[in-house]
Amino acid sequence: MADNYSRRSRTVAGGGGTSLYLEETGRADGRPILFIHGFSQCRLAWTKQLRSDLADEFRLVAFDLRGHGQSAKPHDAYGDSRLWADDVAAVIAALRLVRPVLVGWSYAGMIICDYLRHYGEENVAGVNLVGARTRLGTPDAVAETGPDYLPLRPRLFSADVGESIAGLESFITLCTFRPLPPEEYYLFLGFNAAVPPYVRQGLMGRSLDNADLLPALTRPFLITHGNDDAVILRRHAEHNAALLAGARTSFYPEAGHNTFWEDAPRFNRELRAFARSL
């Protein structure tokens, strides 16, 4: 992986004053791309993008969601749509990102919807939904979730260390079509384990459906999804595509939930083309 630019880090006060940790790299004058990770992850999930030749052309920013990575981990601060929206807005404002491309993986699809619902599309150039969920806690959302993932949730919420780690190990294994090499597997396990179980429970305790919002959006969307995603099934990507007028879709054969990691060259190439088209 190339790493042509040094990383710059800082903290930003998000919704309710929650401290959010972020890093950026790439061209200071390039179109900004804001990467938003998923449930129980951190900004390091985007390493294959931040340390790639995307940095030769774009300004690349990734932040740790509240409760994750090096961001603050308050209790009872994960069910309010406005807080998530304010977090994204705070990062955009603090870094003066002009019409960024929002790239949201998995749970971040709902966070992007939170932002667009409360702040609108004016300050966004386009959105890349990556294995992304836009509804949760409804019968339809359950039907679009992989059957092997649902039984893991009690262990992911457990305060027992052994039970929690066992759940995370199963979750990480489920996220990719092929097993990760040990050094990558334990990287993912490390930042997943750093997320307190109460945070994971808070995220998954939400119940919402953005079917009213998506048809009203006019910005370009790229939907990226693995054909063999065992966490969020392909049918959910197709549901999102049907609601978003003119959305482009890109389905990856022999790839799971982590398309941007499993096939980073293709992902980076398609993200570059999408960003350029805006």
Image (tube, helix red, strand yellow):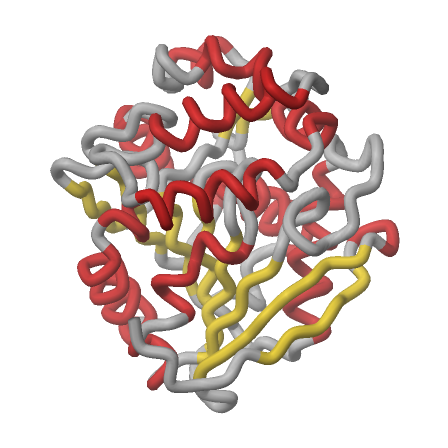
Residue 57 position in % (x across, y down): 35, 84
Residue 219 occupies quadrant: bottom left
Q: Residue furthest right?
A: 17
Look at 56% across and 45% down and name the residue there.
191
Look at 75% across and 43% down and name the residue there.
82
Position of residue 178 in the picture relative to residue 63 (left or right): left
Up the image or down, 220 lies above or below 131; here it is below
Position of residue 235 in the picture relative to residue 109 (left or right): left
Residue 66 position in % (x across, y down): 71, 47
Residue 242 in view here: no
- Front residue (pair 155, 244): 155
Residue 274 position in % (x across, y down): 28, 65
- Front residue (pair 17, 80): 17
Residue 236 occupies quadrant: top left
Residue 71 position in % (x across, y down): 72, 54
Look at 48% across and 44% down and name the residue there.
216
- Front residue (pair 230, 173): 173
Which quarter shows the C terminus?
bottom left
Residue 80 in view here: yes
- Front residue (pair 177, 225): 177
Q: Residue furthest left?
A: 253
Look at 87% across and 55% down and name the residue there.
17
Please give the count of numbered marks on the rendered protein: 0
Up the image or down, 207 lies above or below 91; here it is above
Which quarter shows the N terminus?
bottom left
Position of residue 267 in the picture relative to residue 81 (left or right): left
